[in-house]
């Protein structure tokens, strides 16, 4: 994978406002926050999408994410927040190194705005079975 600006942040070659670091994970403030406290949580493993993460990196992020959310809630005094995670340019990914956004939602104007247009679930049983089978073939 081509190196991104986040690899340089991990190596300390460009500055960031770090809030957390362990062997597998780094968290720092987003440079273009949607609201106060907007934080990015990234694996040190340099891959583009969640599906490419090692189990170890994924587990490390999962372990610390709730703690980071609580810290952001405490400091901002904002109870409500979104976790955003984009995979691929059409899905709004701009930096091609996996990252999770923690975005406080203090009011209707600040934080993440979402346009959500629900469709109608078609052939749900068949679709669910296909996904189950894909999961089973992966673990074989
Ligand atoms: P995404 O659209 O999910 O790829 O979001 C990328 C995020 O990275 C944006 O919210 C940017 O503001 C943020 N970002 C880009 N460069 C930096 C940087 N040097 N330090 C902190 N955040 C950054």
Image (cartoon, rainbow, N blue to C red):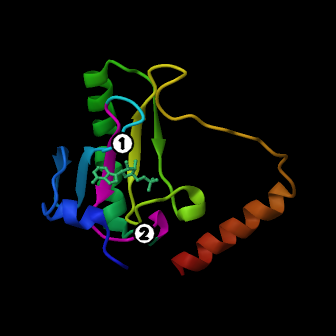
Spot occupied by residue 34 in the image (x, y as percentages of width and height): 42, 35
Which of the numbered marks, if any, corresponds to residue 32? 1
Spot occupied by residue 28 in the image (x, y as percentages of width and height): 24, 46
Who's the residue at 35% across and 78% down the image? 2
* Image quarter of residue 75: top left
Indicate which label's residue lies in the foreground, 1 or 2. Answer: 1
Spot occupied by residue 51 in the image (x, y as percentages of width and height): 48, 68
Residue lying farthest to the left in this orientation: 12
Task: Give the quarter of the figure containing the N terminus.
Answer: bottom left
For mark 2, give the secondary structure: loop
First in residue order: circle 1 vs circle 2: 1
Above or below residue 129? Residue 76 is: above
CB at disc 1 and ligand 1 closer than 8 Å? yes
Q: 32 and 104: which one is in front? A: 32
Spot occupied by residue 96 in the image (x, y as percentages of width and height): 41, 66
Who's the residue at 23% across and 54% down the image? 26
Above or below residue 109? Residue 112 is: below
For mark 1, give the secondary structure: loop
Who's the residue at 28% across and 37% down the image? 67
Q: For label 1, count other residues whose C-alpha is less than 10 Å away and answer few (under 14), some (14-19) or many (20+).
A: few
Segment tinted magenta in the rendering: 37-51
Which of the numbered marks, if any, corresponds to residue 48? 2
CB at disc 2 and ligand 1 closer than 8 Å? no
């Amino acid at each position: 994978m081509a190196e991104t600006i986040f690899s340089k942040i991990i190596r300390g070659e460009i500055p960031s406002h770090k809030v957390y670091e362990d062997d597998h994970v780094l968290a720092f403030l987003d440079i273009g926050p949607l609201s106060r406290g907007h934080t990015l949580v990234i694996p040190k493993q340099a891959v583009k999408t969640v599906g490419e993460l090692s189990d170890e990196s994924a587990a490390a992020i999962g372990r610390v994410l709730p703690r980071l959310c609580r810290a952001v809630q405490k400091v901002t005094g904002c109870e409500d927040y979104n976790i955003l995670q984009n995979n691929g340019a059409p899905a709004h990914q701009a930096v091609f190194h996996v990252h999770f956004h923690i975005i406080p939602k203090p009011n209707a104007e600040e934080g993440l705005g979402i346009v959500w247009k629900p469709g109608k679930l078609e052939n749900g049983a068949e679709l669910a079975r296909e996904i189950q089978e894909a999961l089973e073939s992966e673990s074989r």
